Image: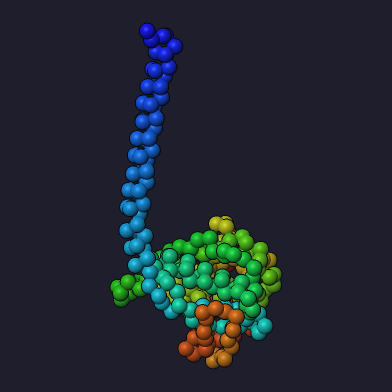
Amino acid sequence: MISRFQKFLFFAMLVACVGMAAFLIRLRNRAQDRLAAQAAAAPAEMAETATSAQKTVTLYVPNDLDDSLIAFDRNLSLPEDRNAQARVILAALVEAYRAPGSTHPMNVASGINELYFLPVRQAKDGAGNAEQMAVVDLSGALAAAQPSGIEPETLTLLSIMATLHANLPAVTQVHFLVDGQQRETLAGHADLTRTYLAGDEPNFQRSASIDPQEPGARPSALGRELPASGFQLPASRGGR
């Protein structure tokens, strides 16, 4: 005769088996959902990779020794989106700042928080080449790493503006923020309350300057160097 204890033990084991089976089924369903999500994300990642193409861009790296900007060509994988392109290009520029042997040394891992474009003026020819203003949100880390002084601060701003305009000619104005906020100066000197013209650059001069420490960089076709000694930032349109 089966005792009451044995009946209780049997039913307890039965409940445990049913619970374990339900738990295993749930785990299997979750694993299937995870695999399905990964499979759905894979084509998007492959598409993003496919839209990135190698392109030669020009980086204007400051030379603190003679207050100049030296142009270097760099091959980068750029996405089709212009906003994403600008972020990749400026990230490469900041990388050049912190590279060993940099002529404008700044020990900062990430210098650009965000970048977006605003329309300035529509092209008269209707060709779609409307002028744009780039709003560049610099990181507080870059501002903190920036050597204080009118010359090095000015060179940093000129470097960013010249690099943007050289690779994205539609960018004719640049406005700077720091950590998403309006700031009076970059590090005590260069004015950040203004919106600067990016297209009004002095004539380029030939230069044989090469940074041997910059990986993957080479002088641009003309080996251009932009004199910045005594150079004033371009006047803004309606700026203070």
Which quadrant, please, contains the C terminus?
A: bottom right
Q: Is residue 118 above or below residue 158?
A: above
Q: Residue at x 48, y 71 (%)?
A: 89
Q: Residue at x 38, y 35 (%)?
A: 24
Asked if residue 120 shows in the view, the reply is no
Task: Kindly indicate the quadrant of the structure image that contains residue 194.
Answer: bottom right
Q: Is residue 174 above or below residue 65?
A: above
Q: Is residue 220 above or below residue 94?
A: below
Q: What x and y, as percent, mark residue 15?
A: 39, 22
Task: Kindly indicate the quadrant of the structure image that contains residue 231.
Answer: bottom right
Q: Nearer the viewer, residue 144 or 105?
A: 105
Q: What x and y, as percent, mark residue 157?
A: 58, 72
Q: Residue at x 48, y 63 (%)?
A: 115
Which quadrant, please, contains the N terminus?
A: top left
Task: Kindly indicate the quadrant of the structure image that contains residue 51.
Answer: bottom left
Q: What x and y, as percent, mark residue 172?
A: 46, 73
Q: What x and y, as percent, mark residue 233?
A: 58, 76
Asked if residue 126 shows in the view, the reply is yes
